[in-house]
Amino acid sequence: MKDYVEKNLQKNEKIIIRAKHCKIVPIIMLVLGILIAILALLMLIAEPAIGIIFLAFSLLLIVMPILTIKNMTLVVTNKRVMGKYGILNSKSFDYPIEKIGIVQVKTTLLGMIFKYKVINISNDELSAQSKKFFAPKRNSTEQMFKYITNANEVKNAITSAIDSFNEEKAKMQAQYIADAMSKENTTK
């Protein structure tokens, strides 16, 4: 997944922070999956149908968290937030910094125990149609990333990137106005 980020970097774009994933969750799920697999093998002797169901469940417990974390990336650059996730249906997103609406960090009970958080990022913007009418409708797309150990740092990096973008935009506007005023004064 790191190749995805490097291949899609633009000119003068630098990575500010990369989300880090909790390493303990896949290990716990692996151990739990192995225990259920042993139970499933014992159940195959007594009740084959139930044993097969438990065996399938144990395989899911073993494989899903490992593949989920392996196939997930979240990166904040100086220009955008980009990410990719998914096992069978891979999804990617690319939000320009100025389009980021809400960044939430949530902690679950397991997250408190194993020191990880969930981060939600949305690009919350008014739809073009709602600008024409009085009742605004929002077009919001939310991306959720689980098992992130540095979620607060990612959130702070996004907030800082938004602030830097807004400062740069204000400087450019001020320079544009100053240039326009100096041109007006020189023509008089």
Image (spheres, rainbow, N blue to C red):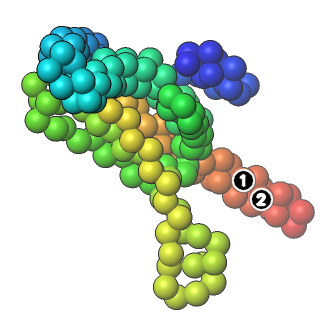
- Whole-percent x, y for residue 11 in the image: 73, 25
Q: Nearer the viewer, residue 76 or 45?
A: 45
Name the residue rendered at 80%, 62% in the picture.
185
Within 10 Å of disc 1 (Cα), the crowding (few <14, some 14-19, many 20+) is: few
- Residue on which the image places disc 2: 180
Q: Marks 2 and 1, how far apart in space?
A: 6 Å
Q: Which image quarter holds the N terminus?
A: top right
Q: Nearer the viewer, residue 35 or 154?
A: 35
- Whole-percent x, y for residue 88 in the image: 54, 31
Name the mark on residue 76.
Answer: none
* Foreground disc of the pair 2, 1: 1
Position of 94 compared to 121: left or right?
right
Residue kind at label 2, given as amino acid type: Ala
Q: Is residue 157 visible?
A: yes
Name the residue rendered at 22%, 18% in the picture.
44
Above or below: residue 137 compared with residue 187: below
Residue kind at label 1, given as amino acid type: Tyr
Position of 28 compared to 9: left or right?
left
- Whole-percent x, y for residue 104 in the image: 31, 46
Name the residue rendered at 62%, 15% in the picture.
3
Above or below: residue 153 compared with residue 126: above
- Whole-percent x, y for residue 82 in the image: 55, 34
Within 10 Å of disc 2 (Cα), the crowding (few <14, some 14-19, many 20+) is: few
- Residue on which the image places disc 1: 176
Q: Residue furthest right?
A: 187
**Disc 2 vs disc 1: Cβ atoms closer than 8 Å?**
yes
